[in-house]
Image (spheres, rainbow, N blue to C red):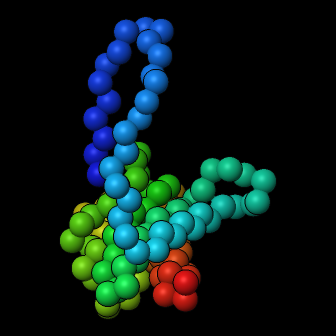
Amino acid sequence: MDEITIARREAGALITAVTLPRPLGGTHHYQKVRNRVSYAFGLVSVAAVIQKDDTTRVAFGGVAHKPWHVEAADASLPQGAAAVTARAFADARPTDDNASKLPLATRTLAATIVEGRSA
């Protein structure tokens, strides 16, 4: 969920290794909502890491040109999914074509939280 820096390489260069940061603790959950099972492109997706103390990190997909994570929204989890998405999308300016993604993101996050707490 953090920014990744990619160094420019010469054309034809071969990548031989990738070093990733240590994984976060907690349980990791991902949900993707699609129009139909046959379509790979998700309307909305939610990735969440839920810790035992109920702290969380949440990122949304399908709502911007890259995964959408607002750190301040993570602290809103005790107030529920609606509070998290309200804070995460406080600066979003949806159009008529994509405004339906906001309530869909809230419902998808709520389902992800239920799954995470039952794991």
As displayed, is residue 115 above or below residue 22? below
8 lies above or below 77: above
Q: Quadrant of the C terminus?
A: bottom right
Is 43 positioned to the left or the right of 75 in the image?
Answer: right
Residue 18, image quadrant: top left
Q: Position of residue 109 (x, y in %)?
A: 48, 76
Quadrant position of residue 88: bottom left
Residue at x-position 29% and y-position 24%? 7
| Left or right: where 55 falls relative to 95 | left
Whole-percent x and y of residue 12? 48, 9
Residue at (31, 81) in percent of width and height? 55
Which x, y percent locates residue 56?
34, 76
How many marks the image carries: the answer is 0
Q: Is residue 29 visible?
A: yes
Between 70 and 1, the one lying in front of the other is: 1
Q: 25 or 59: nearer the eye?
A: 25
Q: Does 31 sit above or below residue 56?
A: above
Q: Position of residue 20 (x, y in %)?
A: 37, 45
- Could you tell me which quadrant the N terminus lies in? bottom left
Q: Residue furthest left?
A: 72
